[in-house]
Amino acid sequence: MGTSPAADSEATAKRNALLLAAAQAFCGSSAPISIALGGLVGMYLLGDDKALATVPVTGYNLGVAMAALPAAMLMGRVGRRNGFMAGACVGIAGAIVSSFAIFKGDFLMFCVGMLLTGCGGAFTQQYRFAAADQGTDEFKPKAISWVLAGGMFAAIVGPQTAIYFINPVSAGLDLAAPYFALATVVAGSIVAYVKGALGRAGGRIKALAVIGAAGLIAFWLGPHIAGFVRQLFSPVEFAAAYFAGAILLAFGIVVLSQLKFEAPPTDEMLGPKDTGRPLAQIMMQPRFIVSVICAVASFALMSFVMTGAPLAMKLCGFSPDDSTLGIQWHVMAMFGPSFFTGNLINRFGKERIVTTGMMLLLACAVVALMGISLTNFYVALILLGFGWNFGFIGATSMLTETYRPQERAKAQGANDFILFGSVAFGSFMSGRTLNAFGADGWNAINYTVFPVVGICLLSLLWLRFQTSKTGSR
């Protein structure tokens, strides 16, 4: 008996969500590398005045904002799969330019490279929407969570890649061989799984043999590739780490090539081009307004605090490895709860999860203000990650209820333009705040959390009042 169209659609949605989660693990690694090291590289490249140290990170976020609408529109024309692969290629170009700029000591070129990396990151940010475009309404929050859960692995892969290429044998053991072998086996296993090769008795042995052989080849080639990259940029401290990000994006392209989205979408799937509501009408909905406010606050505050944290840690005498590990714990906390955030949203509702996220952001600021030990920094960054996860996933889920299928490109693009424009502003102001307040700069950053979270909580109360007044969601 054949499966129903609904069952086929649900299976395709789950398959794509799995692939996008894996792609997030590879392609999403460029974000923690860029943010963990961007401010430190800025300080390294600048002279005595360090006020513009976080401008490269701002460039990354600005690139995400600038490319948000074009990325959405491009994928509306060529399809999700081709668009995502093109975005990864832009990210590779950005990584190469960034590493070359560090090697040459060119601050402006480094900012351009980070801008390009951010443009590629704009496509990565669309993974969550792509995962939610298919499947049932109940599956959509789970799909978003699955994709963002892939970011937890990016949180491990990205910073560890940066640490490795900054100081490859700090622990007395060069891990290039197992690193490349594991990446190859993971990417190969995912491709084999979605192609059904691992589910067929006859094809399973062949697929495993091919994956194993590829892993052995990668095990042998890994040290040679890593050694070549390190020697290429030696003795500059950070350049090789950025170049390694291009390699991770290349693995991501392999995974993205297996997606099965429409390319290009048919007119029937998009609906008549002139039947969608004007963008202004969509954006004036109370639910759209509140979802954007909460998403912007969650992400911009996260960027504001996270961008300043490595610089504050350096000023407190901690090493680049300490700050990079702090960012790793933070990004793991950002994406780790995604394994169950979708279930929590289905059980408790989107607004309650967003409210919980806001309270966790407040807790982050409180811990950060209690002291400047390494423990304070790490715990605050972990709470910041948890708060972002609940606030951002909840707000994104709210947003998906505000537009029709034929309106999704412009609604999602407008949301990400506002979102990452605010994130870019937050990262820029982080460095300016640290520089302006001097020894009290880290405290000034964390005091800012309180009024912003207050605005979000008031907006959620306003939405609840509007909902009860109109009798709608």
Image: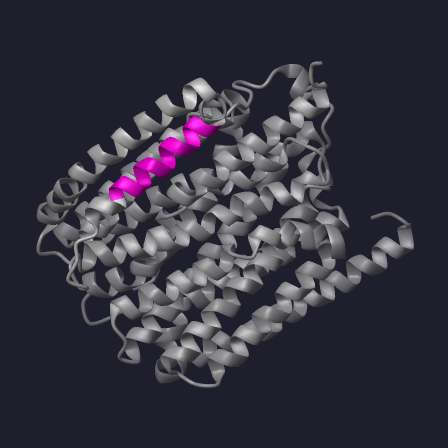
Examine the image and state in which quarter residue 229 appears: top left
Examine the image and state in which quarter residue 66 appears: top left
Is 460 displayed left or right of 444 in the figure? right
Residue at 91% in and 50% down = 471
Task: Give the magenta-colored segment's residue range.
Answer: 180-193
Quadrant for the N terminus in the image: top right
Residue at 53% in and 29% down = 73
Whole-percent x, y for residue 251 in the image:
33, 35
Q: Is residue 257 magenta?
A: no
In the rendered view, tell whether residue 63 sits above or below residue 42.
above
In the rendered view, tell whether residue 28 sits above or below residue 410.
below
Is 141 displayed left or right of 146 in the figure? right
Picture mark count = 0
Whole-percent x, y for residue 90 in the image:
34, 35
Q: Is residue 420 visible?
A: yes
Residue 157 versus residue 401: which sits nearer the camera? 157
Is 258 displayed left or right of 291 in the figure? left
In the rendered view, tell whether residue 63 sits above or below residue 452.
above
Residue at 37% in and 38% down = 186
Residue 437 versus residue 184: which sits nearer the camera? 184
Q: Is residue 67 visible?
A: no
Residue at 36% in and 57% down = 35
